[in-house]
Image (cartoon, rainbow, N blue to C red):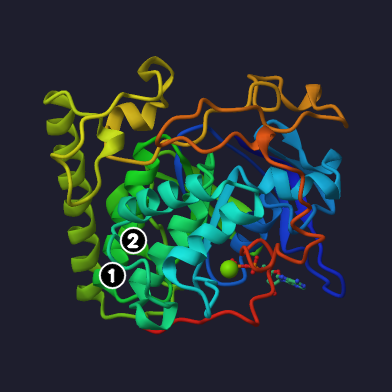
Amino acid sequence: MIRFENVTKRYKGTSKPALNNVDFEVLRGEFVFLVGASGSGKSSCLRMVLREETPSDGRVVVLGRDLRTLSNRKVPYFRRHIGAVFQDFRLLPGKTVFQNVAFTLQVTGSSRGYIQQTVPEVLALVGLDGKEKRLPHELSGGEQQRVAIARALVNRPQVLLADEPTGNLDPATSIDIMQLLARINGGGTTVVMATHEAGFVDQMQRRVIELRHGEMVRDERHGGYGDTSGLPSLAPQEERGAAAVAALTAVLEVQREAAAAAAAGLDPTAVTRDESSDAPAERETDPSTAPDAAAEASAPAIPPRPAPPTPTAPEPESEREPESDPEPQPAPVSHTQPIPVADIPEVDVAELGLADRLGLDRRDDDEVGPTS
Ligand code: ADP
Ligand code: MG
């Protein structure tokens, strides 16, 4: 799904590499914490996955694509398979919640009818029903992050990257966001989250990759945060502990609800946080191909777009990566499935200057900051 092969990154004008020989692979369906002190290289890793940065040495393979061979023209299409959320939300301040999410679909040429149907579905999934007409400044920080997550999910990406998504949120709100990310992962979306939040990492016992001064010093399947002595304490220790325990409880609760819904013959992918008994629906993904994490958690969640056959075929994936790789293939259309990318007229998002507005660019000068 994501492979770093001996990746070294040297930024211009710096003496020490930001990443030094980093080598790991993230598998489909995993939830991976990327931890390490500020400046250890977490964001650089995530930007590399988005191809916002390129390695000085080594290579990065994402969804079967060797990013060295991905032409600039293809980058916007590639990024549609990868959702990204950031500490500072990066919403469009003059647009409503609905418009912020719809915008992503508009630039990819989705029909009005499809947008009208899909945006409310995604907003419901992140717990924002009824808030469609609000502007970002009329929302709490946690709600703003939910909008950002909805926007990141609206194209049904296979991978969700989260760079310190709880960094601007209070502990209680952070729990909600963690719970949401766990649920998204439960639906099969691979999640890679850079974080300083030791409590969540310790409690969730997911895979942990630790960076120190750009070097990978740990890759543990069910890890904790590790040495927290270097962490700036942003909240009292008791509060952190309480937040983590509450987060875990919330995740377990969602998993129980999903199990109950599944036992009752409901589709766990069709339910939302507050609607676990609603709307029986056809299962859209073949359970036999569901990732382990999804099967394990069976949480109500948002299924990712099915893998495009060619670029995400099984190993060896990168070797078969041609220069003229096809665009992502159509996914089946249904009430919860997006319009196939192949049906969408080609619009170069980067050329239109829209990449940054979609949160695909690091510039965020015209966008709203945290309010909490
Ligand atoms: P983290 O997200 O873990 O805080 P970063 O990936 O942001 O770490 O940064 C890793 C190192 O690379 C830091 O020393 C940082 O100063 C440096 N760095 C990051 N981005 C740039 C850049 N665009 N130009 C020069 N140096 C950078
Ligand atoms: Mg960072």
User: On the image, which quarter does residue 4 sit in?
Assistant: top right
Q: Quadrant of the C terminus?
A: bottom left
The kind of secondary structure element at disc 1 is: helix
Q: Residue at label 1?
A: 173
Rounded to the nearest angstrom, the CA distance separating label 1 from label 2 is 6 Å
Q: Quadrant of the N terminus?
A: top right
Mark 1 belongs to which amino acid? Thr
| In the depicted structure, whether residue 362 falls above or below residue 72 | below
Q: Residue at label 2?
A: 177
| Residue at left offset 31%, top offset 35% | 269
Residue 241 in the image, given as x and y percentages of width and height: 22, 67
Of residue 193 and residue 7, the one placed in the foreground of this image is: 193
Residue 50's disc number: none
Residue 7 in the image, given as x and y percentages of width and height: 75, 48
Residue 291 in the image, given as x and y percentages of width and height: 42, 26
Q: Is residue 202 left or right of residue 74?
A: left
Number of numbered discs visible in the structure rendering: 2
Of residue 139 and residue 244, the one placed in the foreground of this image is: 139
Of residue 356 and residue 119, the one placed in the foreground of this image is: 119
Q: Is residue 333 left or right of residue 300?
A: right
| Residue at left offset 38%, top offset 47% | 223
**Label 1: how many Cα within 10 Å (few below 14, some 14–19, many 20+):** many
**Is residue 175 something that shows in the picture?**
yes
Mark 2 belongs to which amino acid? Ile
| Residue at left offset 41%, top offset 47% | 117
Q: Are marks 1 and 2 in contact (CB under 8 Å)?
A: yes
